Image (spheres, coloured by chain):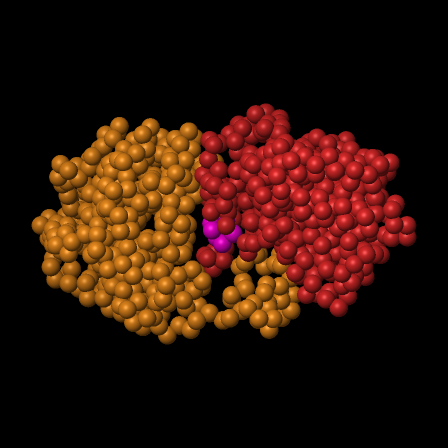
């Protein structure tokens, strides 16, 4: 079982940061240790309340979860990192360092973090355009993500993708067309099954995309061929500016697979996400597709051009922030169960802020890609068209001339 | 030139009432006069390699080392089936799927493959074009060879988003990290004379507008086999449009060995000095007939006939070299003229050969109407219309 902490460790190593606080070093050391070898002192057990899971044609996951304290704290750290990352993106956008589209997942951090904690790095993930959190959790560095947002050459897609088009190992993006990534997820899952890998694919989409025809086409193919795909609907209650109930005949998204079983999950609880995805992963690899609905909430607008307050009240947002915040809520549970101390969490908070601040400074210093990059990767090198036209003849790019 | 004048009047009438159309219809019979004495169509084409001797003389097949080997008489459907058999046998990541393909497909192109290679590699999908394309792209992103069939090219539009936004840009938008080069979409296109709105279209130009895709249209069994294998093995996503009228009607001696023909390389089928005539797919046979009529009616004139074969990225150089000699160009395709591929080629040649051109580039294309079931023969850029265009350009 691969733990969130492993990814943190990988990333730290990748970023070349030698100044890890003790806690992270411990996390790294324990990452590959199975839970069963841990003594009672090292583990922590959480209980879920009645409404955490609701099943559709399937038993719900266990209402208790035991994990190492290190892993539990690792989940907190990663949520804090994702939030800080999105805050940095938000401020950079407002300073006009990022232009164009930018979709933030602030409020939804428990989903990417909980998922990554439950799957292996051989599993595949594909999502739509609200992808920064997933890109980070799959192993991209904050510098790579922020640089991509700013269109810099060391961005994860060499600055040519931007907010919606980010990739990492076994993370198939970052897709701009609503719902279009879902059948791709089925195809990826087919290839996994075909190759005999005991892995699965998580195909994520929003409550808005849930109404796209190709989502249902994908359900059908997935069930017909029992593909190891977990369809994950991130229901943040609004498809752009339209409340879910105004767009969907059935807003119980976990039941919309009809012949595919489903589970509704409290997507504001990172432990619930982790528990449900671990359960779903086992089911998908053994038996085929499953639909998970993550009930979540985005604090910001749909994108940077949406203030997010015209189709919902400020009170509603404030209410969600104060009663359901995934980070604050989880912090209380960590303290209640004695998994860690307030002081340790403060160290993590400070460290996360520092790491993202440093990443932002680093990303800002990276230059834009060389102009010649514009012409690369349209076709495979060596099989290009003779030339591609620019705006004026002088700009035309000839592939066979240096 | 009385005939040309007649044609102009007739074409002008086409916009008038059905009564006028009837008179156009009856007048077509008189306009067809130049055809007399010639055997027309693919069934009598001299472009096809009908004999083993003609196969042996093909320079391209010789370059591939298959001109001397065994061959078998195949129609285009069988040649495509044979190409898929080769790729299934040599690349075990190859999977063939689409609506009804396990049973052989509606045109029987995949017949026997499921028995030979197993139901897990050749399978039916639901009627979900967008899903088929996206599913194929996902597989290809994993490094698989995905050969997906869209049952009719007319049905490709629900998959347009997947092909244009997902397949074509996957490599570019991921900075080269992922690609879907193993993707090939096969789809039957063009008219058979009675297909109507949703079974006759030639949508290649929509995709010829998209950087990142390749678009191929074969004219014969030998071409289809070599080009399809090249398309499947090309490391870029490729659309393979198969003129369905040729599935049964085009028959050639096809090498039984595995071979590829070059993509993005036009082929000069007949050399000539006075006018360059360019097309692709089934249109080549109308062009061949038009040239036969011209050379009969205008002694001394020779026409150069070029099959473009790949229309993205296309071989402008071969066409430009030809036009620089002949000074005249006629381009023809079944899709409508407006924004059709001929417009691109005409503009490109006008830029490259401006001072060599003796007359405006002529385009002979489908009419700018939805593909009309009952009027399909008026819609078509038939040999007579091409003949008139060649005459116009020669006498400009």
Q: Can residue B334 be seen here?
A: no
The residue depicted at 27 percent of the width and 64 percent of the height is A90
Question: Observer-nearest residue: A359 or A261?
Answer: A261
Left of B79 or right of it: where is A348?
left
The residue under the point 39% across, 61% down is: A162
Q: Colour of chain B?
A: red
How far across and how far down the image is residue B162, in percent? Answer: 47, 46
Q: Position of residue B256 (x, y in %)?
A: 74, 35
Q: Is residue A376 something that shows in the picture?
A: yes
| Residue B49 versus residue A336 in the image, above or below | above
Task: Specify the segment rendered in magenta.
Answer: B165-170
Q: Residue at x 65, y 43 (%)?
A: B14
Q: Is residue B20 left or right of residue B329?
A: left
- Tell whether position A379 is magenta: no
Image quadrant holding the C terminus of chain A, namely bottom right
Q: Return the residue nearer the eye: A72 or A261.
A: A261
Q: Quadrant of the N terminus of chain A?
A: top left
On the image, which quarter does residue A355 sit in?
bottom left
In this view, B143 is above or below A352: above
Residue that lies at the very extreme toward the left in this rendered image = A336
Residue A191, horizontal then vertical, whole percent: 47, 39
| Quarter assignment of residue A26 | bottom left
Q: Position of residue A175 (x, y in %)?
A: 40, 51
Q: At x 84% / y 36%, what residue is drawn?
A: B36
Query: Total of numbered circles in the picture?
Result: 0
- For the stretch drawn in magenta, the main secondary structure is helix
Supply the letter of whichever chain is orange. Answer: A
Front one among A157 and A320: A320
């Amino acid at each position: 079982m691969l733990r969130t902490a492993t990814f943190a460790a990988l990333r730290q190593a990748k970023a070349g940061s030698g100044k890890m606080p003790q806690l992270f070093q411990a996390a790294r050391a324990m990452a590959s240790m199975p839970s069963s070898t841990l003594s009672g002192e090292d583990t922590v057990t959480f209980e879920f309340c009645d409404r955490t899971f609701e099943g559709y044609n399937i038993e719900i996951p266990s209402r208790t979860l035991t994990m190492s304290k290190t892993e539990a704290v690792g989940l907190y750290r990663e949520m804090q990192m994702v939030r800080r990352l999105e805050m940095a993106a938000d401020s950079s956008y407002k300073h006009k360092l990022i232009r164009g589209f930018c979709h933030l997942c602030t409020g939804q951090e428990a989903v990417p973090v909980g998922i990554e904690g439950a799957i292996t790095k051989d599993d595949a993930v594909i999502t739509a355009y609200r992808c920064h959190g997933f890109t980070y959790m799959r192993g991209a560095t904050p510098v790579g993500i922020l640089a991509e947002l700013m269109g810099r050459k060391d961005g994860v897609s060499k600055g040519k993708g931007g907010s919606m088009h980010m990739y990492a190992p076994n993370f198939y993006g970052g897709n701009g067309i609503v719902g279009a990534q879902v059948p791709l997820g089925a195809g990826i899952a087919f290839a996994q099954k075909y190759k005999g890998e005991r892995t699965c694919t998580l195909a994520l989409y929003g409550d808005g995309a849930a109404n796209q025809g190709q989502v249902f086409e994908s359900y059908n193919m997935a069930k017909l061929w029992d593909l190891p795909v977990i369809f994950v609907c991130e229901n943040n209650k609004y498809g752009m500016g339209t409340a879910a109930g105004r767009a969907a005949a059935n807003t119980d998204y976990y039941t919309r697979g009809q012949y595919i079983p489903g589970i509704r999950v409290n997507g504001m609880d990172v432990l619930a996400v982790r528990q449900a995805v671990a359960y779903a992963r086992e089911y998908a690899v053994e038996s085929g597709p499953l639909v998970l609905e993550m009930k979540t909430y985005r604090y910001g607008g749909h994108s940077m051009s949406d203030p997010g307050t015209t189709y919902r009240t400020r009170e509603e947002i404030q209410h969600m922030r104060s009663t359901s915040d995934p980070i604050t809520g989880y912090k209380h549970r960590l303290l209640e169960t004695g998994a860690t101390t307030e002081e340790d969490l403060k160290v993590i908070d400070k460290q996360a802020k520092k790491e993202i601040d440093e990443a932002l400074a680093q990303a800002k210093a990276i230059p834009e890609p060389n102009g010649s990059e514009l012409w690369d990767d349209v076709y495979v090198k060596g099989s290009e068209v003779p030339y591609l036209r620019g705006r004026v003849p002088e700009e035309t790019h000839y592939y066979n001339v240096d | 030139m009385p005939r040309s004048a007649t044609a102009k009047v007739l074409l002008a009438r086409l916009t008038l009432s059905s009564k006028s159309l009837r008179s156009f219809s009856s007048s077509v019979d008189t306009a067809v006069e130049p055809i007399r004495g010639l055997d027309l169509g693919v069934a009598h084409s001299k472009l096809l390699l009908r004999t083993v001797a003609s196969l042996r003389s093909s320079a391209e097949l010789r370059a591939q080392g298959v001109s001397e080997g065994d061959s078998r008489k195949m129609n285009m459907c069988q040649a495509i089936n044979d190409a898929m058999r080769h790729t299934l046998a040599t690349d075990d990541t190859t999977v063939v799927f689409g609506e009804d393909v396990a049973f052989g497909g509606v045109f029987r192109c995949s017949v026997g493959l499921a028995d030979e290679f197993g139901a897990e590699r050749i399978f039916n999908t639901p009627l979900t074009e967008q899903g088929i394309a996206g599913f194929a792209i996902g597989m290809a992103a994993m490094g698989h060879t995905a050969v997906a069939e869209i049952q009719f090219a007319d049905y490709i539009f629900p998959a347009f988003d997947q092909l244009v936004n997902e397949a074509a840009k996957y490599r570019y938008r991921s900075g080269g990290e992922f690609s879907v080069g193993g993707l090939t979409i096969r789809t039957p296109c063009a008219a058979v004379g009675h297909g109507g709105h949703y079974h006759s279209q030639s949508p290649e130009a929509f995709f010829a507008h998209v950087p990142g895709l390749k678009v191929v249209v074969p004219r014969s069994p030998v071409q289809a086999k070599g080009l399809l294998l090249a398309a499947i093995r090309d490391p870029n996503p490729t659309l393979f449009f198969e003129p369905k009228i040729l599935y049964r009607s085009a028959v050639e001696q096809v090498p039984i060995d595995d071979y590829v023909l070059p993509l993005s390389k036009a082929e000069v089928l007949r050399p000539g000095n006075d006018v360059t005539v360019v097309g692709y797919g089934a249109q080549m046979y109308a062009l061949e007939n038009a040239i036969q009529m011209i050379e009969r009616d205008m002694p001394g004139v020779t026409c150069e006939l070029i099959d473009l074969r790949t229309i993205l990225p296309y071989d402008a150089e071969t066409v430009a070299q030809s036009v620089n000699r002949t000074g005249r160009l006629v381009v023809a395709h079944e899709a409508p003229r407006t924004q059709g591929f001929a417009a691109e080629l005409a503009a490109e040649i006008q830029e490259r050969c401006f001072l060599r051109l003796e007359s405006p580039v002529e385009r002979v294309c489908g009419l700018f109407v939805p593909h009309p079931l009952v009027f399909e023969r008026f819609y078509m850029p038939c040999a007579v219309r091409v003949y008139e265009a060649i005459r116009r350009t020669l006498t400009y």
